[in-house]
Amino acid sequence: GLSPSEEDKQNILRAVSVRRRCPDAVLWLVLLTSEARAVALDAGLQGNRCFAIEELRDCLLVQSTQCRAWSTLLCNLIVTTDDEEVEEISRPSSARAPDADMANTGGDMAEAEPLEGEGKDAKGEEQGWRGEYAWGLDFEVYGFLPAVRFRGRSFLEVVETAYRETGVVVLAAQVDGKVLLAPFSELQVIAEHTVFFGLAQSEKDISGLRLRATGSGEWREWFHKNKGIGNERLSEASRATRIVEMRQRKSSFSAPRSSMDSSELAGG
């Protein structure tokens, strides 16, 4: 098989080829090593659409040391778990099938010993770490447009109100077309079509937070509209920056020389 560096080189060449042939195509590139990502950026690929598995793994490890169970939270959000799996995970080791324990431990587990707190006939934290873990598996990310009562308020106020009333954790919002995690400073005034994202166990939990006149999927329409508006603003800002740079470069070339340096005087 190919080495990681060779595989990254081939994928970079493919990405550059696609970019040249279809410049308007939305291209995402996932590489194996961080060195290859630097090469891809030098080749002109967009940094926000180019990732290295090595960097993601390292960042995930660092974040996990700062925030307990961060890796578990992130993995649960990107992996779908059905009800049967959740039920199997929530059972105590003594009541689980041997194949299930073998599968979850890579086949190295001879016999699972019950852990402290397992086997209790209760829900949530009373069932020990298995119950807490299975309870967390039920949470999903839901998008929504804010209710009328949230307009003009700050992101912090929405977070506090949502958690106090419904237990929903509002963790992100769309600002200028981009999704920002915890934009406490960036989002001080909420507009009518600001898109929010929250962790909830069901869509019913966010019913009291979203705009009642909208359906559950209307936020997606405004998400794309806001993204387009944000891209237009970014393009205008980039064009303005380029114009200023061109003018500055032009003025520097056309500026008259008011004096001669010492070397030219000495040579004269």
Image (cartoon, grey):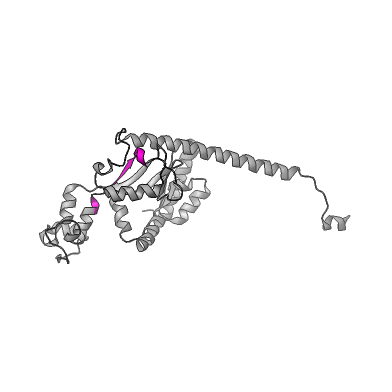
> Does residue 188 appear to the left or right of 145 in the view shown?
right
Nearest the camera: 185 or 177? 185
Q: Is residue 227 left or right of residue 42?
A: left
Residue 126 appears left or right of 229: left
Q: Is residue 188 above or below residue 25?
A: below
Q: Is residue 15 visible?
A: yes
Q: What's the residue at 24%, 41% (across, down)? A: 204
> Picture coordinates of residue 190 (x, y %)?
41, 42
In the picture, which quadrant includes the C terminus? bottom right
- Seen from this angle, which residue lies furthest top? 213
Say which of 133 and 44 sits in front: 133
Residue at 31% from the left image edge and 42% from the top image edge: 209
Residue 138, horizontal then vertical, whole percent: 23, 49
Please give the range of residues in magenta: 136-149
Q: Residue furthest right?
A: 268
Instruction: Tell me: residue 79, above or below residue 239.
Output: below
Q: Quadrant of residue 102?
A: bottom left
Q: What residue sits 50% from the left and 49% below the top?
A: 41
Looking at the image, can residue 3 be seen? Answer: no
Q: Position of residue 87 (x, y in %)?
A: 16, 52
The question of residue 159 being in magenta is answered with no
Q: Residue at x 33, y 48 (%)?
A: 161
Front residue of 70 and 42: 70
Q: Is residue 137 magenta?
A: yes
Left or right side of 129 for 67: right
**To which quarter of the image does residue 90 belong?**
bottom left
Residue 195 percent coordinates (x, y): 38, 40
Task: Report the number of discs.
Answer: 0
